[in-house]
Amino acid sequence: MKFKIISKGDKRSNKIKSTIKQYLTDFELEYNREEPDLVISVGGDGTFLEAFHRYIHRLDKTAFIGVHTGHLGFYADYTPDELEKLIIEIAKTPFQIVEYPLLEVIIRGNSNEKEDHLLALNESMIKTAEGSVVFDVKIKGEHFETFRGDGICISTPSGSTAYNKALGGAIIHPSIEAIQLTEMASINNRVFRTIGSPLILPKHHTCLLEPKKDKSFLISIDHFTRTYHDVKSIQCRVAKERVRFARFRQFPFWNRVRDSFVADDKE
Ligand code: NAP
Ligand code: MN
């Protein structure tokens, strides 16, 4: 089995990286940057997002695991205390795989046929540098509303605990194949009206955002943001690709939610 380790870059994460690398090499596993079967991220959820995007071109062949060196993360959910056990488990392979849904975003331009296909593990946000965004929101080809406001966040179930949560979105269990649309400061008065509530769309229900006036947007995919000019439409749906996690022990999603957001004092 081939593996690769991505560290956050701080002293502690680098040290853990070299320990894991040393032990796994001693177990005769091969360190391979190009075609790893297992990618181990050491740091936080941000480090995990970087690891995911680095191997996004071969998701079907890559399993991911996250060790946290800061606070408990949603993707980085193994502790440095578990390292020894984890290394032995990895060396024993094959391991169990758990898959989570991803968000597919297709950005189409007005002037050319070019399409940008993107995948997000957490979310995509559509905003503008100044003023408010105005677009028609279509769901399954039907006009749903005209949105005016700061922007829209479209998140995955595993991303529902990230930015989506700060916007008042629901936390969705990642076994549910869905995406969630949350509004960012929508304008609501007698002239403009939006639904106001987060929307959860099942697989195959495509959401299309069509700009009404300005065609330039700031579009983020997880931790990257880019400016797109002359945008004709932004299409979002549950991706056919999935992210694969290597699983060595149980740590149910709701326990992660509790331990991250609610007190971790157990009765
Ligand atoms: P960051 O500014 O360091 O991330 C903000 C926080 O979100 C960090 O504590 C990060 O954990 C955490 N986080 C990331 N993914 C998460 C998830 N799926 N569930 C719960 N918490 C999560 O930037 P970053 O580390 O590059 O991460 C980018 C992500 O941060 C974005 O995709 C966005 O969802 C999120 N974010 C959230 C807010 C907000 O809640 N208001 C603001 C900006 C960004 P670590 O410390 O372990 O990295
Ligand atoms: Mn971070």
Image: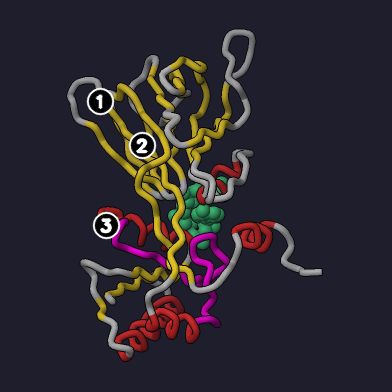
**Side of 242 where 163 appears, left or right:** right
Q: How many marks?
A: 3
The residue under label 2 is 105
Residue 31: in magenta span: no
Q: Mark 2 Cα within 10 Å, few/some/many (few <14, many 20+)?
A: many
Location of residue 217 in the rendering, given as x and y in whole percent from the top left corner: 37, 29
Q: Quadrant of residue 209?
A: top left
Name above or below for residue 133 compared with residue 246.
Answer: above
| Magenta segment boundaries in residue numbering | 60-82
Residue, x 34% and y 73% (percent of image)? 5
Q: Secondary structure at mark 2?
A: strand
Quadrant location of the N terminus?
bottom left
Q: Amino acid at mark 3?
A: Arg
Location of residue 193 in the rendering, given as x and y in whole percent from the top left corner: 59, 15
The residue under label 3 is 58
Residue, x 46% and y 79% (percent of image)? 12
Spatial separation of the CA atoms under disc 2 and disc 1: 13 Å
Res. 69 in view: no
Residue, x 54% and y 75% (percent of image)? 79
Spatial separation of the CA atoms under disc 3 and disc 2: 18 Å
The residue under label 1 is 109
Location of residue 149 in the rendering, given as x and y in whole percent from the top left corner: 52, 24
**Residue lying farthest to the right in this orientation:** 267
Q: Amino acid at mark 2?
A: Val
